[in-house]
Image (cartoon, rainbow, N blue to C red):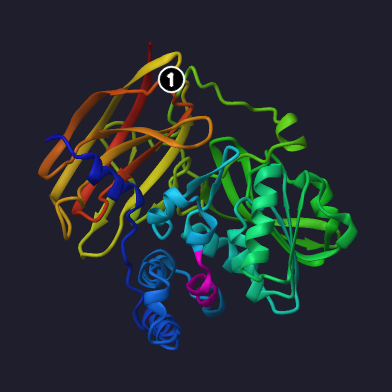
Amino acid sequence: MNSNISKTQVNILVGQTELLCFGARWWSCMLLVALQVCVAPVNAQSRDPYVVPRRKMVQQAVVGSGITNERVIAAMAATPRHEFVPVNLRNKAYLDMSLPIGGQQTISAPFIVSFMTEALDPQPTDKVLEIGTGSGYQAAVLSPLVKHVFTIEIVESLGNRARATLKRLKYDNVLAKVGDGFKGWPQYAPFDKIIVTCSPERVPQPLVEQLREGGLMVIPVGERYQQTMYVLRKKNGKMQAEALRPTLFVPMTGNAEDNRQVKPNPLKPALFNGDFELTKADYPFVIGWYYQRNVEPIDDDTAAQGKRHVMFSNDKLGKSAHMLQGFPVDGREVGALRFAAQVKLRNVRPGSSRDKVPLFLFVFYDENRKEVGTGVVGPFIGSQPWGPTQKLIRVPVQAREAILRVGLFGGIGEFSIDDVKIQAVKR
């Protein structure tokens, strides 16, 4: 049941994050957000055209995705994200998506910023070290929540720009510098908290040494496209790790990248755990896939192949159900991806608009992480037993990596998938 979908629809789907409902707690957080908007001057919206988009972002991408810390919610509502993205991307500033900021770096999606901030448990007396300043947005969110923020960026042009932006917006308790974050900032150690917004293969030892006893570190760790977000607690000089969720961040460059042992092969793109057979005890997520919403791993005899598959389900408008996975692909050598999957549908229909439909969506990025093309398989509507779907997806010659997004994207019903595969076709 595949059909074409317009580029406008694809752009909407890339940034779409739907609203979840969390009962009484949700309403108390909504009241907080509403009060923050209401206490502004009557003409605030005329001066700041981003007031309404920012409020919607907080409702959907922050509160709607499970963030409950009221101080974090308030900081997200007050921080002007549009000031930290390139001017030509400001129309996307309040979508729940990462955006390129130059220097092969990105600004993280609002949900991830709020999730990491909440996991850090910021306190008014905290001295926090941030590794990976990027645009300065994460530092700006932390600024009203802690006493001091020390932030390091390895890309000189980004570091200088972020420092100027933070100074212009009067985030006076943020001190920024250009340097290799792997080494930390020993001059101001020890730190109460450390937050790392880029991914090393393993935790840098200098950061462990600069964290005070009893302190917390929030950091994504792992292979380039297979990372896990951890919160680490320093106890008796050693780090105790708690896995939070699968995630995808740009790599930590400098010393960390130079010593990376497992490097991806962009000439042989592949999906990890596309048959969903890999599992881990007491782990609620689908291994290898990140940013999962309303997706359930199914372990019974109803899979299309093997013993396991996954199902996206949604019975209410305004809820999202999706997941994604990134992989390297060099468009100079790979001309197309041969895609195949097994799909099962039960009473699947579009959501509140025709753009909100179940599908597989490939988004390709160049070496600067700028979007250079898309490919769509779907949409899928109605009911059907397990059956194959396949398509040849063209790879733009500028592509150096890609992200596969799959889910209901606001559609309603049950959308099950299994045996998802890609195979490179030489250019």
Foreground of the two, 127 or 325: 127
Q: Quadrant of residue 238?
A: bottom right
Q: Quadrant of residue 421?
A: top left
355 in relation to 303, above or below: below
Q: Position of residue 124 (x, y in %)?
A: 70, 79
Foreground of the two, 309 or 122: 122
Q: Is residue 243 magenta?
A: no
Q: Which residue is mark 1?
A: 331
Q: Position of residue 145 (x, y in %)?
A: 64, 75
Q: Amino acid at mark 1?
A: Gly
Q: Quadrant of residue 54?
A: bottom left
Q: Is residue 376 visible?
A: yes
Residue stretch in magenta = 73-80
Instruction: Tell whether 85 sits left or right of 407.
Output: right
Residue at the (43%, 30%) spot, across then down: 271
Quadrant containing the C terminus is: top left
